[in-house]
Amino acid sequence: MPPAMPLPSTLAPQKPAAPFLPFTRPTIDDATVAGVAEVLRSGWISSGPQVKAFEAKLSEYFGGRPVRAFNSGTCTMEIALRIAGIKSGDEVITTPLTWVATSNVVLEIGARPVFVDIDPVTRLIDLGQVERAITPRTRAIIPVDLSGLPVDRDRLYAIAQRHKLRVVEDAAQSFGSTWKGRKIGALGDFVSFSFHANKNITTTEGGCLVLNDEREAKLAEQYRLQGVVRTGHDGMEVELVGGKYNLTDVAARIGLGQLPHLEEFTAKRHELARAYFEEFSRPSVAALGVGLPVANFTDTNWHMFQVMLPEARLSLKRAAVMEALHKEGIGSGVHYPAIHLFKLYRAMGWKDGDFPHAEYAGRNILTLPLFPAMSRADVSRVVQALASILESHRIP
């Protein structure tokens, strides 16, 4: 007879696998879910009273500035450029280390993006190099607050004023960040935010544009919906070419539910970011040479925690590191490859070596998990897993 199989009670206990930890996950409360259901039952699910209420709350948050909501944080930048009068043949200065939408919107209106390398410490556009990139065709600057760390607004606007340039702040990642105690968006020229699913507050998809006056706000409304201007019950006129960029009431209701939690979310992100710094400061981990972000706990909202892999010390590339993390049940992200090395931009004349700091970051930057529902133990798990992978593939 074959030997009897052991009863389940005699088997060695198996340690349950830790749940998969994504690099981000939105936190949406039950009240917001119920509020969305109310909007769906109301019969008014496209742009309507919820959008107006959301815009009013956003305006209040930004100190009374006009705000208009849109279906993405990409069209907001394009519309800002159009309102600013940027046109074919003009140049717009920006960073090559950002989501490609930042420069794509410049191409969309027929202008040319002009890239300036990043500061290797902050990973933001190097303001010390911006003025050298200005030509008689330069009309605007699009700075980017990568990971929620604000670009130096004092230096930025001093340059803009000296050269009579408009500024379209790509603040997609810095909702809740501040500059010298004032909220990003409460000051400056055009300020564009994203409410994408991975942002600090979300509408699932969406964005908003903070404007300077009601004239610009009216233009934004026209560009938002086919250029249409309505009067009375049946009056309709079209004066310019607009698009289909309106936010839905369903999305706006999610945003209204998210706003009251912003301070709570930001505080938790700060707590988790501090935990990351503590974990990376352990001697055995610090010896691996991982590049850390600026430890700013005054201005940034800690939208992301991004490290720089020690390229010269590793026998494997970033993709292999990400795969190894994934096998450990840990998600990660890349934010971002250097834009000028995409085929579209190479065809316009950019090449390897043009912006060495952005290129290094584009090869080695790695976004680690950071979202409010995480625990301190999650941070330890991430750093321990990454350290183990790097140690196993360290070049002697």
Image (spheres, rainbow, N blue to C red):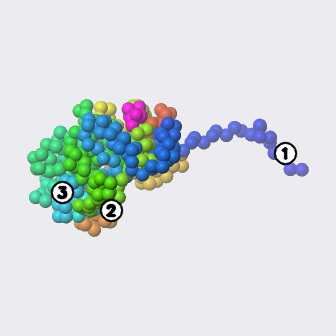
The local crowd at label 1, few if under 14, some if 14 to 19, many if 20 or more residues have their Cα within 10 Å, is few
> What is the distance, in whole Å, between disc 3 and disc 2 at their CAs?
28 Å
Q: Secondary structure at mark 3?
A: loop
Left or right: residue 300 versus residue 318 is: left
Q: Nearer the viewer, residue 396 or 336?
A: 336
In the drawing, does residue 22 fall left or right of residue 47? right
Q: CA distance from mark 3 to mark 1?
A: 82 Å
For marks 3 and 1, the one nearer the N-term is 1
Tally the marks: 3
Provide the residue span drawn in magenta. 259-266
Please name the residue that numbered disc 2 is placed on.
342
User: In the rendered image, which residue does mark 3 sit on?
Assistant: 85
- Disc 1 secondary structure class: loop
Q: Is 387 covered by the magenta stretch?
A: no
At which x and y percent is residue 233?
Answer: 32, 54
SS category of the residue bearing label 2 = loop
Q: Amino acid at mark 2?
A: Phe
Residue 355, percent across and down? 25, 55
Going from N to C along the chain, the mark reached first, 1 or 2, is 1
